[in-house]
Amino acid sequence: MAVTIRDIRVICTAPEGINLVVVKVETSEPGLYGLGCGTFAYRHLAVKLVVEEYLKPLLVGRNVENIEDLWQLMNQNGYWRNGPIENNAISGVDMALWDIKGKMANMPLYQLFGGKCREGVAAYRHADGRNFEEVEQCIQGYLDQGYRYIRVHCNTYGGNMGILNNASGLQSSSANAYTMHKTENAPEGAYYDPAQYMRNTVELIDHMRGKFGYQVEFMHDIHERLTGVQALQLAKDLEPYKLFFLEDALQPEQGEWFEYIRKQTAVPLAMGELFVNPMEYKQLIEKRYIDYIRCHISMIGGLTPAIKLAHFADVYGVRTAWHGPFDLSAIGAAAQIHLDLVSPNFGVQEFSGFTPEEREVFPGAPEARNGYIYLNDKPGLGVDIDEEAAKKYPPTFRENFWLKCRLPDGTCVRA
Ligand code: GCO
Ligand code: MG
């Protein structure tokens, strides 16, 4: 008899203070369920509502086997599509269905996807700090743990905490000895100055290359904060330092600018954590303007579209570097790593680690050892949720000050 979907529930939890969204699909088979990640940390209740009020009534009673068909059904059922709320809702169900399929086959997902290309997945970590000394210590800490890829920042994205540091007198480098200017009656916000950020970044990377040499791979995330020509300038200035890649140089809306960066520099380019629509990445891959596609798997609708995207990128010689930030559950992280294990065109995996609280909520979370991430070999995704533990960490409303970005003259801009 066919195994069918009996119930779909959404569990929101914040074991690390970041709102995570997990979808649980329960089946007609006692004890058989799947888990998926639909984390949109800043709109978690909207995702929950779409799953519970729209997807659940659409799916209950349907055969769990036909993932592709169910994905197409979910994707077209709202008529308008490709937004982050809808995609995360679909992703939660989609990953859960893959989890169920793996459990039914008694295989880890990487087996169902074709089998491993590698045993472990090389990961990169974020090094940051309020000044160069702190960044150095952070890099050294990751090197000591065995990581070989490190993303280097100072004062977070765009250096927009510089103003606080100046006040606290913590800066030790000339790059940080800068006072943010503002207009009279300036609205509150996380201010940053693109020109200053660009200068600081070149000095930062130069300093860290001097300190750590070229053995370690460095990357840097512009976080879509520059204009096309600014991104081009920064890419050219950073070229001598042989970055592993320069991440998210431009806003998704400005993708055409990659042609100019590509034709004028040899800096490897990674792009796409904000993408939600295939139209945003199709051309960049086809034209080979980027080297790494780094979509957030739940933001593009789950594993079903991500598998296709990985294969599509492979045809064009573009590698994968899926977005692996803090606002991702261990279930979402495991989904990425299953795909990393089987993709011949895997590049590197962004990894944010798991706190003891996250491990308590998500038994079976992936583990990092000596710079590589490993999965357990349990069937399906291999990560469970302890719902009682999850309740101890209820989601909270977060004002997200860092997302209230402004230029020095007060103009509100992208984070
Ligand atoms: C990254 C990202 C994140 C995002 C975050 C937004 O490269 O990891 O840029 O840090 O800022 O996911 O919520
Ligand atoms: Mg990023």
Image: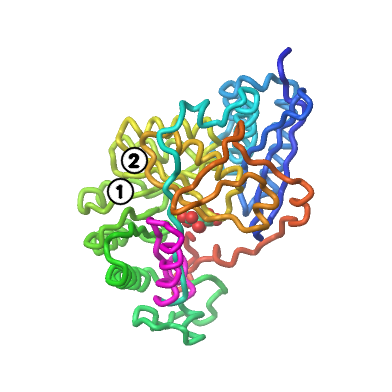
Residue 39, relative to residue 148: is it above or below? above
Q: Does the magenta stretch include residue 136?
A: yes
Q: Which amino acid does label 2 sit on?
A: Leu
Q: Do the residues labelled 2 and 1 touch (CB within 8 Å)?
A: yes
Between residue 245 and residue 403, name the one nearer to us: 245
Judge left or right: residue 13 versus residue 224: right
Provide residue 280's location: percent of width, then percent of height. 42, 40
Q: Determine if residue 195 is in view.
A: no
Q: Is residue 278 left or right of residue 266?
A: right
Name the residue tied to disc 2.
284
Quarter of the figure that contains the N terminus: top right
Q: In which quarter of the image is residue 103?
A: top right
* Residue located at (64% from left, 33% from top): 96
Q: Mark 1 points at which residue?
A: 258
Q: Which label number is shown at residue 385? A: none
User: Splitting the image into 4 quarters, where does residue 298 fall?
Assistant: top right
Q: Position of residue 119 (x, y in %)?
A: 44, 39
Query: Which quadrant of the view contains residue 247?
Result: bottom left
Q: Give the residue displayed 51% in from the left and 41% down from the top.
A: 336
Q: Is mark 1 on a helix, strand or loop?
A: helix
- What's the residue at 66%, 62% (across, down)? 398
Residue 97 position within the rendered picture, expressed as x and y whole percent measured from the top left:
63, 29
Residue interval drawn in magenta: 132-161
Q: What residue type is labelled 1?
A: Phe
Q: Distance between the residues labelled 2 and 1?
A: 8 Å
- Image position, residue 80 (x, y; %): 58, 33
Q: Callout 2: 10 Å neighbours few (<14), some, many (20+)?
A: many
Dot 1: few (<14), some (14–19), or many (≥20) neighbours within 10 Å? Answer: many
Question: Is disc 2's CB within 8 Å of ligand 2?
Answer: no
**Is residue 305 shown in magenta?**
no
- Tell me: residue 27, above or below residue 159: above
